[in-house]
Image (tube, grey):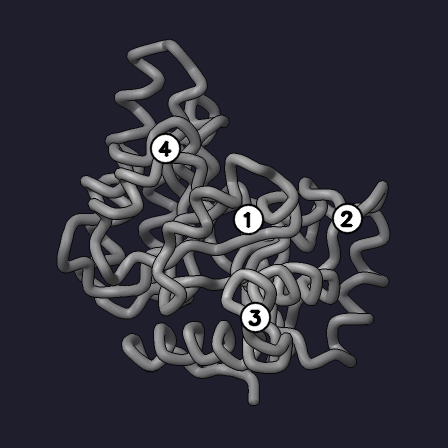
Amino acid sequence: MIFDTHCHLFQYDHADDTRAQLLTRPIDVTVVTESPAEFAQILPWIGDTQNLHPAIGMIPQDINRLAPERDRLLETLPKTQYVGEIGIDYVTQDQTERRLQERVFESILASCAEAGNKIITIHSRRASQAVIDRIGKKFPGVAILHWFSGSVAEIEAACSEIYFSINPAMVRSRSQKKLIAAMNPDRILLETDGPYVLQGKLPAQPQDLHHVIHYFARLWDIPPSEAEAKIESNYRCAAAKISLPLSN
């Protein structure tokens, strides 16, 4: 089983066809959303499928528009164990917008911590330390840093329980490879971030994650089958901490 922890499945062109293909494959996908409204929209679209899991999110880059939906997100949290994408994005230089992102992220994180059973995929562009500081050392859930682009020092200083999800674009980047090499192999997970990440000239698909698995096989000097089993075990161990039911 391959676990894709961060995929914007609803945003693909021909999303219905992509969804139908996934239902026939040994791939488990966390379907992230960018707003509570999108989460509500995908619930009937996903239905009762066993390997597609809707995650409620609030993307930080659009926080000025989305902030009024925070209460709706918090009210919906008890209905799902999957959260994302949420986080902080310091690409903006607007300090008021940054503070708003921080407050919204902190409130969502606090509600997830209180529940204690959430798996969260987190955006941290140019804000890695700010996100890591807010997760803290004893977060009672599973925190995954999606497409981490901080520093080796931040990786080394991060809580030993934080996970990092790696996508096909990351293993093609020289700077990203240096970061990946510094990550604890026990904390490596997979993501596509499709359709925003490309594989060749096309949006990356969850089945394309075998390219990432082969990269780790080379990095760890083990057969691809062992690399796949290792990363699957990482996810299953994380899920077991919060009694998250998984596809077999």
Q: Nearer the viewer, mark 4 or mark 3?
A: 3
CA–CA distance in space, label 2 to label 3: 18 Å
Q: Amino acid at mark 4?
A: Ile
Q: Residue furthest bottom?
A: 248
Q: Could you say which quadrant of the image residue 160 lies in?
A: bottom left
Callout 3 crowding tier (Cα within 10 Å): few <14, some 14–19, many ≥20: many
Residue depicted at x 34% and y 81%: 240
Q: Amino acid at mark 3?
A: Phe
Question: Which mark is drawn over residue 3?
Answer: 3
Q: Nearer the viewer, mark 4 or mark 2?
A: 2
CA–CA distance in space, label 4 to label 3: 24 Å
In the rendering, at what x and y percent does residue 70 appear? Answer: 36, 39
CA–CA distance in space, label 3 to label 1: 17 Å
Residue depicted at x 78% and y 80%: 24
Q: Earlier in the sequence, mark 1 or mark 2?
A: 1
119 in relation to 230, above or below:
above
Q: Nearer the viewer, mark 2 or mark 3?
A: 2
224 in relation to 162, above or below:
below
Residue closer to the observer: 236 or 228:
228
CA–CA distance in space, label 4 to label 2: 26 Å
Left or right of 224 on screen, residue 83: left
SS at badge 3: strand
Question: Which mark is drawn over residue 88?
Answer: 4
Q: Amino acid at mark 1?
A: Thr
SS at badge 1: loop
Q: Earlier in the sequence, mark 3 or mark 1?
A: 3
Q: Amino acid at mark 2?
A: Gln
